[in-house]
Amino acid sequence: MSNIAPSATRQALRICSRRCPSNNFSRLSPRASPSFGHNGRRSYVSETKPINATVSVETAIKADQKAFLRETGKKPQDETMPTTGLSADTMMSPSAGLLKQATIMDEGTRPIYLDMQATTPMDPRVLDAMLPFMTGLYGNPHSRTHAYGWETEKAVEQAREHLAELIGADPKEIIFTSGATESNNMSIKGVARFFGRSGKKKHIITCQTEHKCVLDSCRHLQDEGFEITYLAVQNNGIIDMAQLEAAIQPETALVSIMTVNNEIGVVQPIEEIGRLCRSKKFFFHTDAAQAVGKIPIDVNKMNIDLMSISGHKIYGPKGIGACYVRRRPRVRLDPIITGGGQERGLRSGTLAPPLAIGIGEAARICKEEMTYDGKRISALSKRLLDGLLALEHTTLNGDASRHYPGCVNVSFAYVEGESLLMALKDIALSSGSACTSASLEPSYVLRALGNSDESAHSSIRFGIGRFTTEEEIDYVLKAVRERVTFLRELSPLWELVQEGIDLNTIEWSQH
Ligand SMILES: Cc1ncc(COP(=O)(O)O)c(C=O)c1O
Ligand code: FES
């Protein structure tokens, strides 16, 4: 096996040792984790094999890098990073050892990953749980006549239990889907179509800062004759409860308001919304893709009737999600995918057991480690935010206290966000949600907060997660400070501001 073969185990060691001050590699000994050599052959690291407990991560990474260079004969990084101006030597220096080495396809050094709202890296423990179901345990969980089916079904049902435990639900209320997009479509279109059939319940309330998949589901329902209220948000990104109450009609069938916003991290008053919906006797759906596993959620305490969950936002696999659908009082909905009647008839089709088991394991770990992760992420977030706000003309977008700390969205006045992203190529960041980052339009979420186009254009989202380290935050702070200063010095507007000129008083001539 190649010395530098990528493997879940080696990643696990790096990740764990970063989190544990004792550097005790053996604490999280992975079970049989596969390694993939360059020849593509698989081998397993045994569970009991002793792991060198004295090697520091830094040394391990550097040794890996050396082996990589020896084996491939490659230069560490060809020439320079054009936008950072860092030479290959600098990139490989001990301080730049933070830049992770790629574990796939000889990619060389990789940016620091701070885009946790787009997706999270899979926890190696999740991969360990999934692997047997991608190899020997390949039964169809819906097969009732033999052990292959039974063993897979048992594992899938255990995964369902883990998900249910994380949100205080009954396992029977968990429906596996392909992700939060499908869960949102299923909840909103499903409830609307079921109750809209009578012609009496054809009104839905949502909010302008929802994820595109919620807004788009609502647009489709508008085409089918439903009336939708898109609530505005206040300047802090939170909805106004009085406005929500005022929007209610006798025809209202559903309210859909997200728990944590994916662009600015604000947390909506879910418990209050749930109480209001229950008292008015219509259903409450929440897109909790960015909230589940990160902040405590209890579907009963919060009177949530439907909830969307995504696997890849909680250190699980992509392509799997879940929808919580309340049984008492029973939520009725028209299924979108029909056929064999799996998943209580709400989502037909053979389940993907490795993915379902993966999201279940991810949920189990989240429940167990939420307090620990929460404390770490809050401390890192404070360090980052304090450092960023120490730069002049820099502001946090969204409410500072009703806020999930792992999502920090900041506007840097007089700097163009896309230029800053380009200048920060050694850090994986985004100026908004992954699905809209292809377009250079200013974020509709920031616009809904009342931000100007300029402010929305100068915003960057920093996503902190389970495996982010203090060293990474410090690297990011230093890089942002240097490059914001550099870009501002190029800006004529910044020069005017430095001269004490109020830009609002300037009359720009038109050509
Ligand atoms: C708030 C929110 N809802 C829904 C989604 C879509 O989730 P999935 O990728 O699982 O379909 C995302 C992910 O981008 C999200 O952040
Ligand atoms: S080695 Fe310390 S937590 Fe994993």
Image (cartoon, helix red, strand yellow):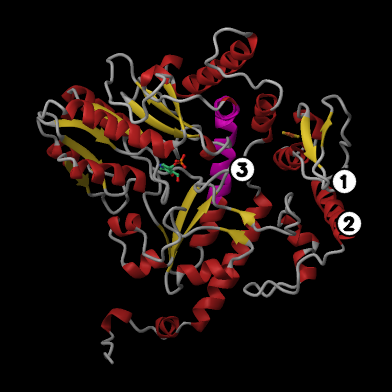
Ligand 1 within 8 Å, label 3 CB: no
Numbered mark located on residue 121 in the image: 3
Magenta segment, principal secondary structure?
helix
- Tell me how far mark 1 sits from mark 3, CA to CA: 23 Å
Measuring from the top left, give residue 405's x and y in whole percent: 49, 45
CB atoms of marks 1 and 3 within 8 Å: no
Q: Earlier in the sequence, mark 1 or mark 3?
A: 1
| Quadrant observed for ligand 2 in the rendered image | top right
Residue neighbourhood size for the residue with mark 1, other residues' Cα within 10 Å, grouped as few (<14), some (14–19), many (≥20): few
Measuring from the top left, give residue 57's x and y in whole percent: 80, 46
User: What residue does disc 2 label?
Assistant: 71
Range of magenta residues: 354-382
Query: Label 1 is placed on what type of residue?
Result: Ser
Q: Earlier in the sequence, mark 1 or mark 2?
A: 1
User: What residue does disc 1 label?
Assistant: 2
The answer to whether 275 is drawn above or below residue 99 in the figure is above
Measuring from the top left, give residue 135's x and y in whole percent: 70, 26
- Tell me how far mark 1 sits from mark 2, CA to CA: 9 Å
Residue neighbourhood size for the residue with mark 3, other residues' Cα within 10 Å, grouped as few (<14), some (14–19), many (≥20): some
Q: Residue at x 19, y 26 (%)?
A: 195
